[in-house]
Image: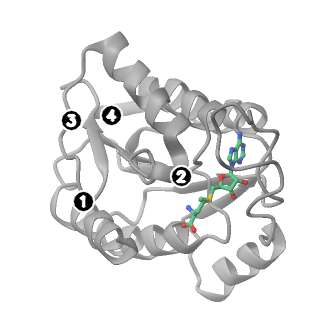
Amino acid sequence: MVEAKRMNLFLLLTDFFEKLDGKDVIEFGSYRGGNALFMAHVLKAVAPKARVYACGTYAGMPVTDAAWDLHGAGDFSEASFEALSKRRDKLKLKNLEVVKGLFADTFPGIARKKPSFGLAHIDCDIYSGVKYAQGASVPLMTQGGYVVYDDADAPSCISATEAVEELVMARRLHSEQVWPHWVFRAGL
Ligand SMILES: C[S@@+](CC[C@H](N)C(=O)[O-])C[C@H]1O[C@@H](n2cnc3c(N)ncnc32)[C@H](O)[C@@H]1O
C-alpha cells in the first residue's frame, strides 16, 4: 500500500504536473518526513522553482477526540524537526521548508508567502487536522491542482473519512481517484 501510494505521488508529479500553473506542494502531517523528502526530491527535478512545505508538530498528535479519532495525543511522537531539517540539508533539498507547529498556527505564515499549490498531501489521520487542512489549502490550490488524501480510506482513520465526506457533500465534488489515494482536483 505504501509503495502504491509512493508510486502514485511520483506519477502525479512527473506526468500530470507540467500543465498546472502553480506547482508548490504542501503536506499536512509530515511525521519523520518520508513523503516530504520524496516529493521534494522529485520536484527538484521536474519543477525546480516550486516549494514543498512539510507541516507537522514533529512532537506527535495534538489533542484528539476519543469519540471518533482512533489516534490519541502523542501518537507519532518519534519525530524531530531538527533531524528532518538536517536530513533536508544533507540531501541538498533547498526547495523543502520544514514547518513546525499546529497547522492552525503555522499555515497563515505559509499563506502570506502566496504559494500556489499544485498538490496538497493531507496525511494527518484525525478529524481536526484533515478538516483544517482541506479548508485552508483548497482556496490556495491552482486550477486543477491535486488534493491527495493519504489515510482517509484507512480503517484506523474513520474521522478523516468523515471530514472528507463533509467536503464532498458541501461542494458536491467528484473524485479523480479513489485508489491508491482518494484524490480531488481543485476547481474542476
Ligand atoms: C501519519 S503521520 C504523517 C506521516 C508522514 N506524512 C510520512 O510520510 O511518514 C500524521 C502526522 O500528522 C501530525 N498532525 C496531526 N494533526 C496535526 C495538526 N493539527 N497540526 C500539526 N500536525 C498535525 C501528527 O503530528 C503526525 O505526525
Quadrant where ligand 1 appears:
bottom right
Q: Residue at x 53, y 52 (%)?
A: 156
Left or right: where 161 falls relative to 126: left
Above-or-below relation of 157 to 42: above
Q: Work out whether mark 2 precedes mark 1 in sequence or the reverse, and give the earlier one.
A: 1
Q: Earlier in the sequence, mark 2 or mark 4?
A: 4
Residue at which label 2 appears = 156
Could you tell me which quadrant the N terminus lies in? bottom left
- Percent across and percent down for residue 50 are 43, 56
Residue where numbered disc 4 is placed: 142
| 187 and 57: which is toward the camera | 57
6 to 91, vertically: above or below: above
Work out how far the residue at label 2 is from the one at label 1, CA to CA, in angstroms.
25 Å
Report which residue position mark 1 lands on. Answer: 12
Q: Which residue is mark 3?
A: 175
Q: Position of residue 186 (x, y in %)?
A: 29, 30
* Mark 3 CB lies closer than 8 A to ligand 1: no
